[in-house]
Amino acid sequence: MNDGSLNEVSLTLGKLMNATSEAERTRELIFRKLDDIGNCLQKVSTNLSAVTENHAELKEQVETKIMPAVDEIKSIKQKGMGVLVGIGLLAGGSGAMVTKIANVYASIVGKTP
């Protein structure tokens, strides 16, 4: 009877040792993965600061180089629209004047257009 109990204790002790070694392997794996995640976060942080610096440089370039050009183009476009309106009014007025002259000439000559 002692031998049976001793065998049970030995088997239980073996199972416990196997479970402990498996837990150690799992713990080591988890710590390794946590280290990998930490390294990855450090790289992301480094990249983020580089992107922030690039963003600041791009913003400065847009404000100093691009926006003045855009404002100038808008000004030219607005002036161009004013010129087009003026040309349109001139053309309309000229057309009305030509029609009036043609009507006067036709009434003098006796023919209506």
Image (spheres, rainbow, N blue to C red):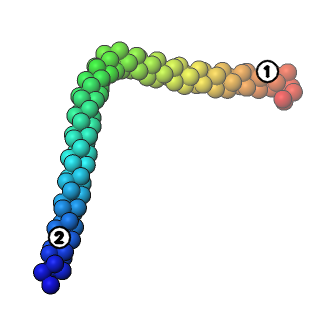
Q: Which secondary structure lies at badge 2?
A: helix
User: Is 88 drawn above or below residue 69 in the view shown?
Assistant: below
Q: Quick check: can you spot residue 36?
A: yes
Query: Which quadrant of the structure image shows residue 107?
Result: top right
Q: Residue at x 45, y 19 (%)?
A: 73
Q: Secondary structure at mark 1?
A: helix
Q: Is residue 75 visible?
A: no
Looking at this rendering, what residue extends furthest in the bottom direction?
1
Q: Nearer the viewer, residue 43 or 3?
A: 3
Looking at the rendering, in which quadrant would you find the C terminus?
Answer: top right
**Residue 43 location in percent, x, y?**
26, 32
Q: Residue at x 58, y 25 (%)?
A: 89
Sequence-first tag of 2 and 1: 2
Residue 108's spot in the image, x, y percent? 81, 22
Kind of residue at disc 2: Ser
Query: Which quarter of the rendered picture does the N terminus lie within?
Result: bottom left
Q: Quadrant of residue 90?
A: top right
> Residue 2 location in percent, x, y?
12, 81
Which residue was labeled with disc 2? Answer: 10
What count of labels does the image hold? 2
* Residue under the image location 28 percent in, 20 percent down: 57
Residues under labels 2 and 1: Cα distance?
Answer: 130 Å
In the foreground, 92 or 38: 38
In this figure, which residue is indicated by the disc labeled 1? Answer: 105
Is label 2 in contact with label 1 (beta carbons under 8 Å)?
no
